[in-house]
Amino acid sequence: MPDPILIVEDDKKTASLISLYLEREGFQTLTAHDGQQALEIAQRQKPSFVILDLMLPRVDGWEVCRRLRQSSDVPILILTARGEEVDRISGLTLCADDYVVKPFSPRELVARVKAILRRGRLGREESERVLSFEDLAIDPEKHKVTLTGRPISLTPHEFKLLQTLMASPGRVF
């Protein structure tokens, strides 16, 4: 079974509604009702997707998004009442994969989750082979890079950039 979807929503009725619709489609869900709890669950459970409200107690959604991006490239869909253009642009610039404004359609939300996961799965299928050049090797499936057999530590963004470059040798970017 795939890793669970983490729903970060302080309104318990909204969280239950989202969970109900996702579980009907076969997804497993986890719920956090504040930002600190979300970060702790994400650290322990490694969710496959995060649905994130911005207006949360303890740690706000903006900070949760920033912290998740420091250590992970998990898909994030922001679901919030903040519908101003500046908020939508900030959310997408902060590396969210999608931004949905409340009130929302639960069926559309599930369709967006599936679309983002499908795109991610297709990208992984293309990249799930070890790439190498001279003494440098990158294993996309294990998310590891080695140089002359020694592991190299990269951020998620550095890893994606190196993977893109190594997957298309000779191509100008």
Image (cartoon, rainbow, N blue to C red):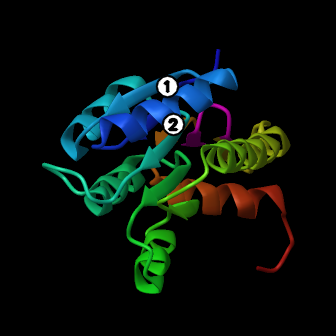
Asked if residue 140 is among those painted magenta in the image, a careful observer would answer: yes
Please, which residue is most extreme toward the left here? 58
- Dots 1 and 2: beta carbons under 8 Å? yes
* Image-quadrant location for residue 7: top left
Q: Is residue 147 visible?
A: no
Left or right: residue 66 versus residue 107 is left
Residue denoted by label 1: 29
Residue denoted by label 2: 18
Q: Give the magenta range.
A: 139-146
Q: What element carries label 2?
A: helix
Image: 100 above or below 153: below
Amino acid at dot 1 = Thr
Q: Residue 112: horizontal and vertical position, in percent?
A: 68, 50
Asked if residue 43 is among those painted magenta in the image, a careful observer would answer: no
Q: Distance between the residues labelled 1 and 2?
A: 9 Å
Question: In which quadrant of the rendered image does the N terminus lie?
Answer: top right
Q: What element carries label 1?
A: strand
Image: 32 above or below 106: above
